Amino acid sequence: MTFSHNPDKYPHQTGWRAYQEYLRRNQKQVDKIRLRRLCQRLILGGMVALMVVLVGKVFFTDKEKAPAPAVRIAEPAPAAPPAVPLSKTGQPKKLIQKSDVRIFLGNTRLTNVVEQPVEISFDHRPYRVYTSLDLDLQQYLLKKMDRVNSRYIGIVTMQPDTGRLLTMAGFNKIDPDQDACLRADYPAASLFKIITAAAAIQEKGYTARTRLKFNGYKHTLYKRQLTDRTNRYTNAISFKDSFAQSVNPVFGKIGALYLDQQALATFGDAFFFNRDVGFELPWPTSHLEVGPDSYRRAEIASGFNNQTTISPLHGAVIVSAIVNNGKPAEPTLVDRIDDPSGRMVYQSSPRFLPPAVSPETAEVLDQLMIATVKKGTARKPFRGYSRDKVLSRLNVGGKTGSINNRTNDVRFDWFVGYATEKKGSEKIVVSVVVAHEKYIGIRASQYGRMIIKRHFKDYFTKKSQTGTDSSS
């Protein structure tokens, strides 16, 4: 996949980096325009609210007071909020759009938040930001983080049916000010097998039972392994098991021999590589560049390269598509913003991104990811889950990935997955990256198990207390 850019602005740059620089410079101009409009809307909204209050005082006596406009205030509710301007439907007007929130928040950091609300300043006025984070789960993860053996840790938990983030917990030993959950320069490793599998299912009709062949070791990728030659050393394996065991030569052959350049690029695009996704904080795009070379395609399809990169937040978005029958959730971190007087100036609402795959493809991907936890590369950290009081009540799927950096002093370790309630509607997706240094500490899949068990333990306890738990 190639990108175009303006040669007058960047005469000495070509390719993806120049394209990203072009986008960043363009975004600054867009942000300035949005900032001016945002300030205008806030000022106008405040004037309208003041007029509503004054009109109420003039036209209503003490015996006949004006009815209070309907305002949705989340806990903890501020005292005595003033009236807000109403739309024709009688609902509060949203004065700030999601696209404006990034400008509104400025340099505010919302990773590792441990208390609500978050106080910010905009246009020299204080505002309160209420996030979607589960602070108990967030604090639990922050206490569990292995900061001794890890260079980076990024942990994102999301509700796939709403896009609301429940955790954004990160650690960056090199640059503490850089958000480890939003960085998009981590090698995707075998996570990209999800994209390759989606393309093979939807374009080539693969099912979980499709039989495939490979030669050599499972986790190597030599050019001699990328042929259809069969001999006495050839191994046969199902598509489901090759995904669960993360067999590189199988996925390398799919990329080099069975899927063309356009197919990999198209499905990468469908899963939002090289594309901006709406979010309240600056979020770099993940990088995918597919070329005509067949071995290069094999590396990309199997995740056997350092050039395809991704962020933990993007990992959660990808998995949400599998849980949502092919439709990724647009992530959101800010539930609500209140102005100094308690008037709500922003309220989020669930949004879905365009479908990445068909529901039928998502169903097969679900089978592959469940097999990964049951008998694949995530089996060990989830061992005994069928007998666990909490985990046994869930359907759990996932995908692991690991690769060294170019200098071989860091081992990137991934787990992305989901858990859905067997007898209920509760579901979450998780995305974890850990960059291990000299020694391997807590693995990404172990963090995944911690998150799932802790979240659903609290959830089932609340269900039991309210009498809505039919299994208790």
Image: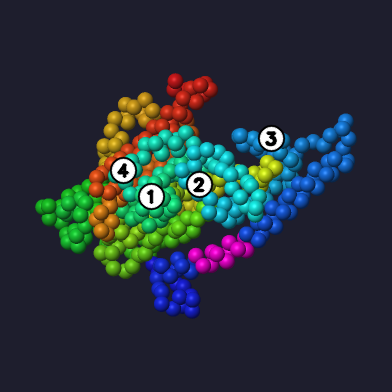
Task: Report helix, strand or loop for mark 2.
Answer: loop
Please provide the residue range marked out in magenta: 24-34
Disc 1 marks which amino acid?
A: Asn
Q: Quadrant of the N terminus?
A: bottom left
Distance (Cα) linking label 3 and label 2: 25 Å
Residue under label 1, please give it. 172
Q: Nearer the viewer, residue 158 or 181?
A: 181
The reply to whether the magenta stretch includes residue 125 is no
Residue under label 3, please give it. 79
Q: Quadrant of residue 379?
A: top left
Residue under label 4, please give it. 148
Disc 3 marks which amino acid?
A: Ala
Q: Which badge, 3 or 2, comes first in the chain's sequence?
A: 3
| Contact flag, marks 4 and 2 (Cβ < 8 Å) | no
The reply to whether the magenta stretch includes residue 27 is yes
Residue under label 2, please give it. 110
x and y percentages locating residue 75 in the rendered image = 61, 34
